[in-house]
Amino acid sequence: MMTDKSIVVSNVSKVYVRRSSFSFGFFNRPDDRFVAIDDASFVVEKGETVGLVGANGAGKSTLLKMISGIHRPTSGRVSVLGFEPARRKPAYLRRIGVVFGHKSSLWWDLPARVSFDTYRDVYAVNKCVYEKNISELFCALSLQAVLDRPVRNLSLGERVKCEIALALMHSPEILLLDEPTLGLDVASKFQIRDYLNYRSAEQGTTLILTSHDSLDIQACCRRLVVLDRGRVGYDGPLSEFSRCSGMSVYCIGLRNRDVLVHNRLQELQELLSRIDGCNYVRVEKDVVRLEVSYRARSFVEGYLLHKKIYYWSSVEKSLDDSFLNFIRSGRETYGEEEGGE
């Protein structure tokens, strides 16, 4: 049965249990349980580009490992291209590419070319297709000059680009990337982002990308899935996330730094502290940043006009700011729930 659903994650949970090594008669230490993924559900359509973000320990890598088949869910179901990933059937593995930023698939002491030739045999890639794919990848990622050098002698950026090229060598339909640009310079990040966009646009490759660099997500992804302590807190268009976080960013431009302006700002700060959804952030040279909820926008604009404080209109909130507000509001909600139990 044909379907446009590349990845289906349905009510998936992953619980790690650390068994106690000490037990004596009736005195048994309880096992430690850690819930890495908590009832997560989402669907990724064919050709979608999805940014998977969250704080450290939110469950991003665990979720990717379940999608790739490295880990099996404790409960729930993961289906990728109609396969159950945990079975790790060769027919499934040939259709995905995976890069984990902290793991290497390259032979450390051998030239990088040896790793590519080995994986060509592992994936049984036709020689003509292999040569075409490798030529394109090496040109796009500027790897021609490094292939005959031992992997241990490559820079971090060169190794990461080789890892990505290796994952794409067999033309996978789905590409899973876990922090691929960690520690890379600006030029290397730009090359990787540019090529990922090309693969998505020209070949319809489905992409799931995790990164702590918001520019990676903004450059390569159209959809955002936010994990918070194993739960899916947001799943929707990247462009709508800042509105979902509930805040606008206002920049107030000051004409001068006289005492009158500062008195007004102090008054504004005291006023905002009593209004729900407003936060006085900081002064940067001649600019004051305010975070203001949508519901409080009209009030704040009216106040600024009345006090003759000159300001610019609201500006687009950065993904980092939106993420911080989203996580902060979620933690406050959880805190209220926990306090009531």
Image (cartoon, helix red, strand yellow):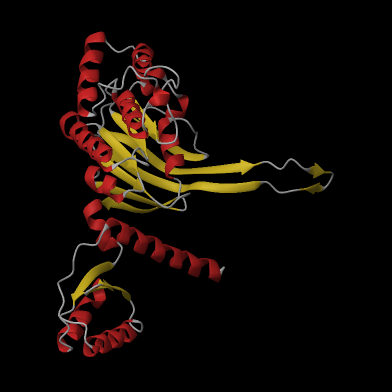
Q: Give whichever of 45, 182 is nearer the camera.
A: 182
The residue lying furthest to the top in this view is 127
Q: Give whichever of 57, 23 is nearer the camera.
A: 57
Q: Quadrant of residue 170?
A: top left
Q: Quadrant of residue 196?
A: top left
| Residue 338 vertical placement versus 75 (above, below) | below
Q: Quadrant of residue 147?
A: top left
Where in the figure is residue 55, as x and y percent of width and height?
42, 52
Tell me if I can see residue 278 in this picture: no
**Residue at image point 18% right, 80% down:** 301
**Residue at image point 39% right, 20% down:** 150
Left or right: 82 as drawn, with respect to 308: right
Where in the figure is residue 291, as x and y percent of width and height?
28, 71
The residue lying furthest to the right in this view is 25
| Residue 318 vertical placement versus 168 (above, below) | below
Where in the figure is residue 67, as x and y percent of width and height?
40, 34
Q: Give whichever of 10, 273 is nearer the camera.
A: 273
* Number of marks drawn: 0
Where in the figure is residue 91, as x and y percent of width and height?
37, 19
Tell me if I can see residue 59 in this picture: yes
Q: Quadrant of the N terminus?
A: top left
Q: Quadrant of the C terminus?
A: bottom right
Left or right: 337 as drawn, with respect to 306: right
